[in-house]
Amino acid sequence: MIVEPSPIVQEGLRKIIEATPEFSVEWTFYDTNRLKEHCLSHNPDIVIFNPSLIGMSAKNSIRHTFEIDDETPLVAIIYSFFDNEILSQFDAEIGINDNNTRIINKLQTLKNDTASKSKTESESLSDRENEILVAIAKGMTNKEIAEKYYISIHTVISHRKNIVKKTGIKTVSGLTVYALLNNLISYDDIE
Amino acid sequence: MHKNTIISADMKMADIIHIDLYNLFIINRFGIRLGFGDKTIKEVCEKENVDHRLFTTVCNINNSATNISKTDIHTEHILQLVEFLKNSHDYYRKIRLPEVKRSIFNLSKGYDANTEKALGHFFDEYIKEFKNHIEYEESTVFPYIKGLCEGKKSGEFSIDKFEDHHDNIEEKLSDLKNIIIKYMSKPEHDLQKLDLLDKLFQLQDDLDRHTKIEDLLLTPMVMKLEVM
């Protein structure tokens, strides 16, 4: 996903990226309108973002504002000066003077990092994920879970995604069986 | 002869079962009985009133030997294909699902009451959804096709509304496989697990092929009828 206000830069970057068989540009944006909805529903592999879009004064977390998954690499496109505080939110930077090879190399490094991270990450659920799992198994809705644990619905959804990713089980009734097998709940809880 | 052999009407019917066991199910679901000696596909089909071009097309879709070409889409025998699909449904209802249920029962009775109930409940739900799906096809899609063949165009339904309703059913089946492979860790029940997984993979394989026939053959046939 590319979020870049300049058509020249956006189109140029797309050409460079799509010249490789490994990467493709699925979504492009000139501004941050509706960016959040897209990040939530499509969960892009890599987000390339021009920091000028959040303004110099904004110290808010870009990830948080646009609901970009913690595991999704965030790359800055830089052609003017930015505060270090803003740049520290990014996993990598693409400079306006970078050549094709450099840009692709950076993306490849990020891709490999994420791949190895998700491999070594433990498969077992965190305590919070176990709590959410139990709630799902009991048939609670996202809204009910959010209220019970004082978290946002987006956070609930993100926990659910992780649970599905870690267990390999997608359906609610499958997760219920999983919870029972692991003695997280008893059958009476769900009747 | 190997799996990718393209099946033609002058081959012996008996031989194609050796190419791929699944062809046996196709033969059966077209209502053809075993005991055809050395007769060719064409001869057997003529005797049983099955269109031999339709028969070989279905076999070849299953063997993934060819991409289906436009010339394979004949609509005049579409009701034979509908009958074939109905027979597949019957087989799922009468054989495949009860078989899996029995295997689940055999496995789960070695576990505590909670697990037994949970697995039983899980699969009962699956069966319910599965049956809903095939009943939808039988009560809505198939009668619509029959109507088209009789020259009736109903306003309400069209085949592009017949989207993939299989999603959730497929996910449940894959969940069940994962649960057994990854999370049921009593080694003394390995044989029962093996048996259940074997049945689940057979069911999945059968369903995949069934869907392929609906997508690659039935749907284009109906689309052709709709514009006629």
Image (spheres, coloured by chain):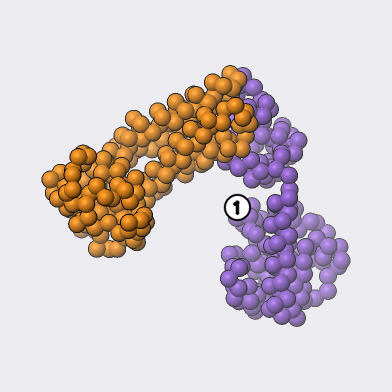
Chain colours: A purple, B orange
Residue B220 appears anywhere in the view: no
- The residue under label 1 is A41
Residue B218 relative to residue A176: left or right:
left
Farthest residue toward the right? A84
Q: Where is residue B225 in the image (x, y as percent from the top left)?
A: 23, 55
Q: Where is residue A135 in the image (x, y as percent from the top left)?
A: 66, 31
Residue drawn where x is 61% and y is 68% of the image: A23
Query: Which quarter shows the N terminus of chain A?
Result: bottom right
Residue drawn where x is 29% and y is 43% of the image: B24
Q: Which is nearer the eye, A112 or A141?
A: A112
Residue drawn where x is 63% and y is 55% of the image: A43
Residue drawn where x is 83% and y is 70% of the image: A82
Q: Which is nearer the eye, A158 or B94?
A: B94
Amino acid carrying label 1: it is Ser
Q: Position of residue B189 (x, y in %)?
A: 57, 27
Farthest residue toward the left? B47
Q: Where is residue B204 in the image (x, y as percent from the top left)?
A: 44, 42
In the displayed structure, B117 sits above or below B171; it is above
In the displayed structure, A79 sits above or below A145; it is below
